[in-house]
Image (spheres, coloured by chain):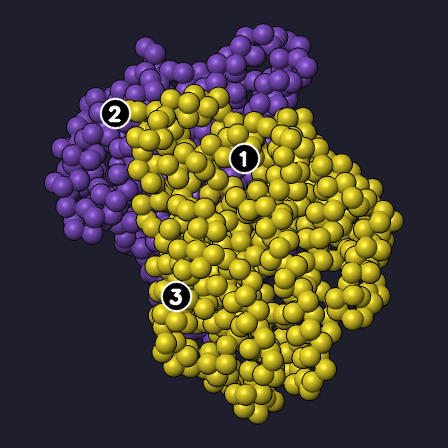
Chain colours: A yellow, B purple
Amino acid sequence: MSAYDDLMAFQRDTEALGQVAGRLSWDQETMMPDGAAPQRAEEVAAMESVLHARRTDARIGEWLASIDDAQLDDVGRANTRLIRRSFERNAKVPADLAKKLASASSTAQRKWVEARANEDVAGFLPVLSEMIVLKREEAAALADGGNAYDALLDDYEPHTSGDEVATIFDAMRPRLVALRDKVMGGAQPAPLDHEFDAQKQMRLARKTAKLFGYDMSHGRLDKAVHPFSSGSGLDVRVTTRTSPRDPFNCIYSTIHEVGHGSYEQNIDADYLLTPLGQGASLGVHESQSRIYENQLGRSRAFTGFLFGQMKDAFGDFGVADEDTFYKTVNRMNKGFIRTEADEVQYNLHIMLRFDLERDVIMGKLEARDLEEAWNTRFEADFGYAVEAPSNGLLQDVHWSCGLWGYFPTYSLGNVYAGCLNEAMRAALPELNTDLAKGDLSAATGWLKDNVQRHGGLMKPRDVIEQASGMAPSEAPLLNYLEGKFGSF
Amino acid sequence: MSAYDDLMAFQRDTEALGQVAGRLSWDQETMMPDGAAPQRAEEVAAMESVLHARRTDARIGEWLASIDDAQLDDVGRANTRLIRRSFERNAKVPADLAKKLASASSTAQRKWVEARANEDVAGFLPVLSEMIVLKREEAAALADGGNAYDALLDDYEPHTSGDEVATIFDAMRPRLVALRDKVMGGAQPAPLDHEFDAQKQMRLARKTAKLFGYDMSHGRLDKAVHPFSSGSGLDVRVTTRTSPRDPFNCIYSTIHEVGHGSYEQNIDADYLLTPLGQGASLGVHESQSRIYENQLGRSRAFTGFLFGQMKDAFGDFGVADEDTFYKTVNRMNKGFIRTEADEVQYNLHIMLRFDLERDVIMGKLEARDLEEAWNTRFEADFGYAVEAPSNGLLQDVHWSCGLWGYFPTYSLGNVYAGCLNEAMRAALPELNTDLAKGDLSAATGWLKDNVQRHGGLMKPRDVIEQASGMAPSEAPLLNYLEGKFGSF
């Protein structure tokens, strides 16, 4: 066996154990009895400790040192690139700091829930401040003299800098604010006013998941408080939720998670349990979930089909026709909450967080000033003031749990989806005819062939560039959004 | 930290990882999508490899060597006894043999399914022969000059010899054969002739599980092809199945597995994630599942209550009254299949396997002669001939998967349940009044206090002896069976 074969055999077991750990999380959110939580915490910690030991195993360094990349094919080079990245990253963070981060993160979740329920920013600031100190320290260790924020961003969106993201986001912001102003100034459709049976919602969700190509023989659809997708390869599970008065929550959470899940299901079978057997980055992942959910799922053509499906499932639910239904699905709210925002305002939420978190990591903003900075920026972009911390600084768990550099991947995903949508529409001129019949096969087939099957083979931006035939930029997304929402 | 503390900290992570591996099995039987099987096999193998490395870690030997048992309390001594047992056992089996056994076992399951479907004994014999060679080799390694069969039995029922089991079984056999003859010679109640809705069966099963004290906040009840219980401590899950024309399958599988699950749930909380945090042996485990299922669940008093529950759930299902229902629940079949047998014939099935498997391991019987030996013995004990291999040698997967020394624990469990039942009835004179009202709390409370809470603290026979106040013997079980079935 060559060093490369040894490395890949070792890595394969690590990947398999990573899948086990991931399934344990899935279980925790879907199946675990409530009283099992304390034991589960020990189980998770034991698995993490096994995985950490494997990921920092000194033999990985030795194998990597004796592999000559020039002797490898593209797949081999991509594998060693990803393993080297992960190994070097883990080596840079002192074990003591990693432990402190894990411990701070595990207590933060509970404290955040409490603080949000009590609108208690002051009580939350110590948690946030401690995490900021630790993340700055981690960023400095990872950056090794380079840019601290980029070092964190690299965990979620490799080979992308904060400056590149800022260039894109800064170009988007004024046009999105203007678009929001325009739509909010016009007439809005009435919200749904009907009770939707939960079992029927789940039945429709299951049917819709299959329409979007999700393979139930390698997956499941269950309920969870916060929908997510979990797993890679032959076992990729998605979740959704039901709300009696808002069936769109169930349907579009399903389509979104099916985007993530299908990406994982559709990766080349040769990459199973290798570093290439997972999506290329969070941004590319989000491009798939978003294009499924929005450019396809919230299109005029597909909502026409969905309107019929919903009437079949629920009877008359008070929406007169396809056009009204389309506008209801895409209704813009004067809201505060990121996860409930429409396609336009969602990006404004993300940009706010990106600018603030970058300033924090770069030492330009402190925890105590975050709330004011948040509220000032919110009013500037949205046109109205945050009236409660749970609608502002306390609305997301991310920062308190140590996820810094994570937020921008959400909007990067939208930007990537814009590029892919433009290319896909050009390649599939009959797509709207298909969508109006509920036939997603051409669209999902195009995404599989051009994006999904490659898994982690290419760098994230390269995935988008080779699929869409253009360097990623904000223009296609903005054109799409202005075209769609400008017509309302 | 002392060597004992170091050992226990290391062991705690191993126990936690063992729970993760167990939950992976649960998932496989209940939730896993069909297409995930090949990936799951790699995940399971990776977990097993992690666990094997921990269980044979040389540090365990060093810690054990530097612990002075005299300095420990009862709990400490029980912990080191169990860890030493497992460590020494693993050290005795050469790694190469362990690998061959694991590989033979993993292919046997599929080949057994095929052979059984095709009534193909000849095609199955090579699989069985290979396993027998390996098990004899393993037994010799484990026995280290001692009795080969005892060495295998010790994996499932520690501190018990084949001779001790044979003494008990040999005393049972003639009385059970005579009892079977007598009952089969009398009038039998008609079998159920009704269709029972699967959802209603599951609802009744859930209600019954709670009646028997199963704690849903630390467990779940799901469906599986072959019912089982899984997990220890704060997360103990049970399964059952439904059959449209046989609701007793669902109800009594539930009660049986709830017996196993409650045992695990009721172990002293101090033993969580330690070697004491699991049942004492398979035999003691089976004593709990059997006493829940049979001495309690199939009693005249409880079936009187269950009859009312079933009428509430299913309406009139064609059984006239409580007495008829009691006889229907305990109906004796002229069957061939162990898992479908009544309380009397079940033990005859087990004794047949015990005698044969002991002869095989001791080198007195070869694979090629097993079918004839089985059929001869079956006709002698049951009074009619096996007419198809799927009803004979091919009916159980155990031997082909390497489970030799496992079968007798089923009947040992019945013997233990007999002892416990006698003592429990003496301690709880009003028990039948409770059972007739569906109140199981006194019975399950007695079992918790006297058996379950101790977990692995005592040796198996000691558990039964201190709980029942007598050395385990077949007499109480036989008296109970003759009293119950003799009255039919």
In the rendered image, residue B435, in percent from the top left (x then y), is placed at 60, 55
In the depicted view, which residue is nearer to us: A432 or B408? A432
Q: Which element type, helix, strand or loop, lies under badge 2? A: helix
Q: Amino acid at mark 3?
A: Thr
Q: Residues within 10 Å of mark 2 (few under 14, many from 20)?
A: some
Q: Alpha-carbon distance for marks 3 and 2?
A: 51 Å
Chain assignment, label 3:
A
* Alpha carbon distance from label 2 to label 1: 32 Å
Residue depicted at x 64% and y 82%: A192
Where is residue B107, by image quadrant? Answer: top left
Label 1 is found on which chain of the structure? Answer: A
Most foreground residue, A325 or B112: A325
B385, above or below A197, in the image = above
Q: Which residue is mark 1?
A: A47
Residue that numbered label 3 is attached to:
A444
Mark in front: 3 vs 2: 3
Does residue B437 appear left or right of residue B387 in this picture? right
* Neighbours of disc 3 within 10 Å: few (<14), some (14-19), many (20+): many
* Residue at horizontal 56 percent and vertical 12 percent from the top: B63
Query: Looking at the image, is A273 positioned above or below residue B301?
Result: above
Residue positioned 67% across, 79% down in the render: A183
The earlier-in-sequence mark between 1 and 3 is 1
**Callout 2, which amino acid?**
Leu
